[in-house]
Image (tube, rainbow, N blue to C red):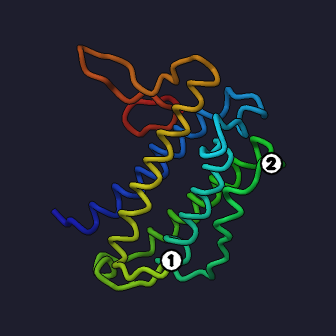
Amino acid sequence: MDLGAAFLAQSREFLTAHYLPKIRAAVEPLAEPDLWWRPNDASNSIANLMLHLAGNIRQWIVSGVGGAPDRRERAGEFARRDGLLKDELLTTLSGAVHDADAALARISRAALAEPRTIQGREVTVLEAIYHVVEHFGMHTGQIAYISKLRTGKDLGFYRMEGGIARAAWPGHPKGGSA
């Protein structure tokens, strides 16, 4: 088994077929004001988290790993309180994920050990990818939780079959419907 190729393939699958579809499914039933709702000033809204994820994946993968110019304005991701609609937020995040997926598709297994400086940190390409996938998963969970708070409904990401939870979110390669 080629572990480098497996790592790259699994990272791409998590970002494109697990996290992005779950975020889309969590956001679609929400009213526009729910996207910007915050329980308090110390917390982020779904919209802020979506902007933050788009900025993070562009900085770490598209730029840091892929070599594109870094134009991130991190503070702005959290400072916004309104102004973007659901479709704009989904387009922004989807575009960033797809650009990152394209950058990852161009990475060779040998490049995983190469050093990069991202956000002033010295990391390998593998560490940068691992950071982004973990970070994306964490905020995907937060977005799902906020969506459940605002709608009072289960998002239906899993269905039980024979006592085993099976993937059921739209777009999942092993179970969800498109």
Identify the residue at horizontal 54%, vertical 46% (top origin): 20
When the figure is inspected, residue 16 is found, relative to residue 114, above or below; the finding is above
Residue count near mark 2 (Cα–Cα under 10 Å), binned few <14, some 14–19, many ≥20: some
Position of residue 167 measured from the top left corner of the image (x, y, whole percent): 38, 30
Q: Secondary structure at mark 1?
A: loop
**Residue 92, image quadrant:** bottom right
Position of residue 98 measured from the top left corner of the image (x, y, whole percent): 57, 59
> CB of mark 2 within 8 Å of CB of mark 1?
no
> What amino acid is labelled 1 in the image?
Gln
Quadrant into which the C terminus falls: top right
Identify the residue at horizontal 80%, vertical 43% (top origin): 85
In the drawing, what numbered circle is on residue 84? 2
Q: Secondary structure at mark 2?
A: loop
Position of residue 159 measured from the top left corner of the image (x, y, whole percent): 38, 19
> What amino acid is labelled 2 in the image?
Leu
When the figure is inspected, residue 74 is found, relative to residue 69, above or below; the finding is above
Position of residue 168 measured from the top left corner of the image (x, y, whole percent): 43, 27
Q: Kindly report the distance in space between the C-alpha atoms of the residues bearing marks 2 and 1.
A: 26 Å
Residue wearing tag 1: 119
